[in-house]
Image (cartoon, rainbow, N blue to C red):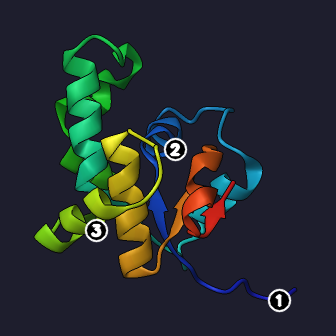
Amino acid sequence: MGRSIAVRALLDTHTFLWWMADSERLSGPAHRAIADEANDIVVSAASAWEIATKFRLGRLPEGEVAAIDVPGCIASQGFGELPISVADGERAGRLPGPHRDPFDRMLVAQALTYDLVIVSIDAVFDRYGVNRLW
């Protein structure tokens, strides 16, 4: 049996939350990629921002565990943190198209800049030429 090629993957916010909850909504390929210890899995600061914001606003009640300690949850899974740089912010702001979600735009910018595969159910990422796994 051949060994898979390691990938560097950026988890979309819902993917991170579904992974933490061991949700069946996570696709088989996504689950296998995240579980593969050969892969470098990262969570963006944009996802921490999104989780904390949406939880505070009452729009993410299922995210309580993660919202209380996002860095601890990331570390507990052996994932890396991906900070947001000024250049990331500039690239996200300059992305073309009408997609208005600032969190998604940041994930696109970071995936393009750092050559990361986005693990997401959201097909909107495909419009930006990023590699998406689901």
Q: Secondary structure at mark 1?
A: loop
List x then y, in percent, for residue 99: 46, 43
Closer to the camera: disc 3 or disc 2? 3
The residue that label 3 is drawn on is 91
Q: Residue visible at 75% across and 50% down?
A: 28
Residue 31 against residue 38 in the figure, above or below? above
Can you tell which mark lies on residue 106? none
* Between discs 3 and 1, the one toward the N terminus: 1
Residue 15: give its label: 2
Residue drawn at the location 15% of the way across and 69% of the way down: 85
Quadrant in which residue 102 is drawn = top left
**Element marked by disc 2:** helix
**Of the pair 124 and 122, the residue shown nearer to us:** 124
Amino acid type at mark 1: Gly
Please tell me whether mark 3 sits on a helix, a strand or a loop.
helix
Q: Earlier in the sequence, mark 3 or mark 2?
A: 2
- Where residue 3 sits in the image (x, y, percent)? 74, 87
Q: Earlier in the sequence, mark 2 or mark 1?
A: 1
Q: Is residue 96 above or below residue 38?
A: above
Asked if residue 129 lies left or right of residue 28, the reply is left
Between marks 2 and 1 in the image, the one whose residue lies nearer the viewer: 2
Label 3 to label 1: alpha-carbon separation: 38 Å
Q: Quadrant of residue 20?
A: top left
Q: CA distance from mark 3 to mark 2?
A: 23 Å
